[in-house]
Amino acid sequence: MNSNKQLPVVEMGDFFSIVFRRWKTVLGAAAVCGAVGAGLGAAAPETYSASAALTVAPLTTSPFAASQQQVNMATEREVMASREVAAIAADTVGNASPEDLMAETSVAAPSGSQVLKVTVKGVDAENTAANANALAEAYLLFRTQGAEDVAHSQIAELERKISDLTAKRTTAPADEAALSSLQDQLVSLRLVGEVPGRVISRATVPVDPASPGLPVVVAGTVAFGLLAGCGLALGRERSHRLKGARE
C-alpha cells in the first residue's frame, strides 16, 4: 500500500450524486424515523391550553397607607401558583387535585403591569378552561381572606377604643376629632379585601389542541430522517472510498 497516497475527500459538488446513488439509504432512514414519529404522535394524547387574565388591586390593612400603591407582582405570581390557591380551585371544580392543578398551571405577569395571566394545559378542553377560571377566582378569594384575617384583630382593637372614647368623651373638639378619626379607620378596615382585583378575560374552551398534531410530528421526524439518511449515505461513501484508497 502506498502510504503517501492522498486519502479521498467528499466535496460539496459530490453531495447530490452520492445521495442519488444511495437513495435507498436516505429513504430508508426517513421511513424508519417517520414510522417512529407516527407511533409517538398516535400514542401521545392531544393537550389543550386555556388562559384567564386578571388585574391585581393593592390591599392594605393600614388606614394611613397611601391610596395609590404598587403591587409586588413577583410575589403575587407566586401566590397564584401556590398550593393554597390550587386547593381552593380544586374544591370548586372537583376534577383535579391541588397537585394536578399545580403541575398543569403556569403564571405570567407582564412587565410593567398589574395583570396576572394564568394558563392551564390538559387533555380535556372543557376542564382546561374551567380550571383556569377557577384558579383566577380562587386567587382573588385567597387575597380577600388573607387581608380580612389581618384586619380582624385591628378592627377589634379599634372598636374597643371607640367604645372607651364614647363612654368618657366630652364635647371637647379634641375628643370629637379623635372619635371621628377612629371611626374613619374602622370603616377603611372593614372594606379591606372587598376589591382584591377582577377577572378581565375569562378562559374559553379551546377548539384546537396546543400540542403538535400527528401530521406535524410525522413531517418533523421524516425531515430528521432525511437529514440522518444523507449523513449516513455520505458516511458510507467516504468509508467506501477510504477502503479503495488503502487497496
Image (cartoon, rainbow, N blue to C red):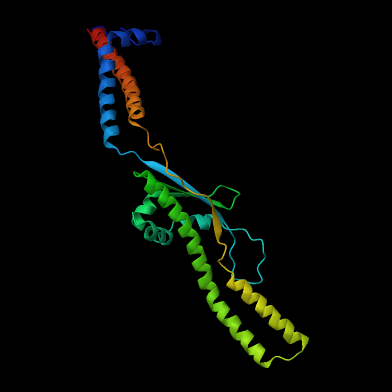
Query: Can residue 190 be seen from the camera position used here?
Result: yes
Q: Position of residue 244 (x, y in %)?
A: 24, 7
What residue is shown at x 74% (from left), y 82% (from top)? 177
What residue is shown at x 25% (from left), y 18% (from top)? 28
**Quick one: 4 or 132, which is closer to the camera?**
132
Position of 136 relative to 17 (above/below): below
Answer with the quarter of the image where residue 247 lies: top left
**Quick one: 126 or 84, which is closer to the camera?**
126
Image quadrant holding the N terminus, namely top left
Query: Can residue 7 be seen from the camera position used here?
Result: no
**Quick one: 97 or 112, which is closer to the camera?**
97
Q: Position of residue 242 (x, y in %)?
A: 27, 11
What residue is shown at x 77% (from left), y 89% (from top)? 172
Position of 59 relative to 49 (above/below): below
Answer with the quarter of the image where residue 217 lies: top left
Position of 108 relative to 232 (above/below): below
